[in-house]
Amino acid sequence: MYAIIKTGGKQYSVAPGDEVKFEKLSGQTGDTIVFDNILFMSDDNGVSVGKPFVDQCKVTGTIVRHGRDKKVLVFKYKRRKGYRRKNGHRQAFSLVKIQDIQITNERHP
C-alpha cells in the first residue's frame, strides 16, 4: 500500500513505515500530522486516482525531528564583466515517519 501526497508545493510517494523529509511543517517533535491532499493511492483492492484529490482517504504521520539540510551553493557569474556572486542556502525540513494510510469509506475504483 502506498500513496502520493502533495504538501509544500511538492509531491511525495509514501508508504507506512517510511521516514520522509518534507519542507518545514508547523508542529513540535512527536506531534501527529494528517495529510489530506492525496493525489493517488494504491492498495490490494486496486488504485484510486484523484480528480484532483482522492476523497475519503488520509495519511497520518508523526514528526520525528526538525532540522536543516546540507548547504547548497548558489554561484552567479557573467563572463568578461567581473561579476561573481557566491551565496549559500540551507533549507529547513521536518522528518516525518508515516504511520498509516487510512480509507474512511470503501472506494469505487
Image: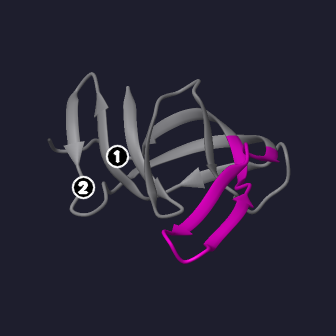
Amino acid under label 1?
Answer: Asn
Q: CA distance from mark 1 to mark 2?
A: 15 Å
User: Residue drawn 43% across and 59% down?
Assistant: 37
Expressed as whole percent of the image width and height from the top left, the position of residue 5 reads: 43, 49
* Residue at the far left in the pictured view: 109
Res 108 → quadrant:
top left
Q: What is the number of the mark on residue 50?
A: 2
Give the amino acid at mark 2: Gly
**Magenta stretch prevailing secondary structure:** strand
Q: Residue at x 47, y 49 (%)?
A: 58
Residue 1 is left or right of residue 40, and the answer is right
Single out the mark in the foreground, 1 or 2. Answer: 2
- Whether the magenta-drawn stretch holds residue 49 is answered as no
Query: Residue 25, percent across and down?
Result: 70, 59
Task: Give 3 or 70, whichever is nearer the viewer.
Answer: 70
Q: Quadrant of the C terminus?
A: top left
Mark count:
2
Q: Secondary structure at mark 1?
A: loop
- The one nearer the camera, 24 or 53, is 24
Tell me, yes or no, whether the highlighted magenta stretch contains residue 88. Answer: yes
In the depicted view, which residue is nearer to us: 80 or 55? 80
Q: Is residue 15 above or below residue 69?
A: above
In the displayed structure image, the side of residue 9 where residue 55 appears, left or right: left
Of marks 1 and 2, which one's residue comes earlier in the chain?
2
Residue 101 in percent (x, y) is at 48, 37
Residue 28 is situated, as x and y percent measured from the top left of the image, at 85, 53
In this rendering, the answer to whether 17 lies above or below 54 is: above
Residue hosting label 1: 105
Q: Which residue range is magenta in the image?
A: 66-95
- Name the side, left or right, on which 76 lies relative to 97: left
Look at 46% across and 39% down and name the residue there: 102
